[in-house]
Image: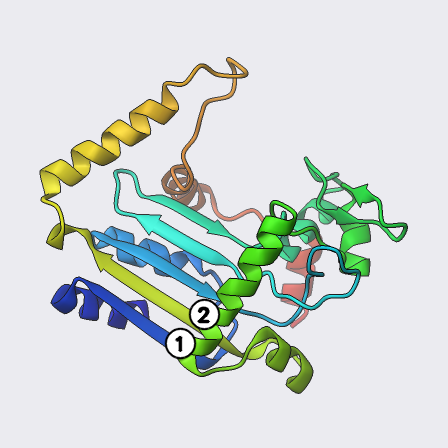
Amino acid sequence: MMDRAIELASDHGIGLVALRNANHWMRGGSYGWQAAEKGYIGICWTNSIAVMPPWGAKECRIGTNPLIVAIPSTPITMVDMSMSMFSYGMLEVNRLAGRELPVDGGFDDNGQLTKEPGVIEKNRRILPMGYWKGSGLSIVLDMIATLLSNGSSVAEVTQENSDEYGVSQIFIAIEVDKLIDGATRDAKLQRIMDFITTAERADDNVAIRLPGHEFTKLLDDNRRHGITIDDSVWAKIQAL
């Protein structure tokens, strides 16, 4: 779908594809990266089944609705984030590693904020990113995807389907070079990045990073050394 959005953007400056009745898109960041590698801004998101309580509720009624925004800088700058403080995948990763979350990620059974991933996985009271802000953003992303695709909302997917399928997704590509020349684009992006990374550090041993800039190094490491998989997950894969 991002391919088609890029085709439209090459003709019109911006391309938008709205998809209904879709399945889980797996690694959504791949679509944003795909656009940025070709020099386009890539924006995409999907709705989901209800797996998160709206702010002020105990019952899951909104989706984590992951959002990706990728910028064609050098290296590529990209945010790939669900509307919860942590995705359920990251809860599992931390639980399997026997780690607490670095910050509160949800509520325990008594309604108190907790860093215990296993508790949040079980009771499904995951914390929206930015509290009420993440809750609100999840809702409007769902509304836009539903309206532009004439597809299913989180409510419809949750109430009418037995699992996460039939979801609605949005893919947007913007050709920056139709608005600004390449040299000016690169200079402006570099100034933004330099301004951020030269800030005084809170910890001299911890570098200031921009979102997505570690992906290239991670990709190289994975190609060279392989991908680390938890033993229990690998055992389940081998048992298939």
Q: Quadrant of residue 101?
A: top right
The numbered mark at residue 144 is: 2
Q: Quadrant of residue 148?
A: bottom left
Callout 2 environment at 10 Å: few (<14), some (14 to 19), or many (20+)?
some
x, y percent for residue 106: 74, 49
Residue located at (24% from left, 35% from top): 189
- Report the side of 219 relative to 46 (left or right): left
Residue located at (52% from left, 72% from top): 24
Q: Which residue is mark 1?
A: 148
Q: Is residue 213 visible?
A: yes
x, y percent for residue 111: 85, 50
Contact, CB < 8 Å: mark 2 with mark 1? yes
Residue located at (44% from left, 14% from top): 200
Q: Is residue 201 above or below residue 14?
A: above
Local SS, label 2 = helix
Q: Which is nearer the eye, 16 or 143?
A: 143
Q: Which is nearer the eye, 221 or 71?
A: 71
Q: CA distance from mark 2 to mark 1?
A: 6 Å
Q: Is residue 149 above or below residue 113?
A: below
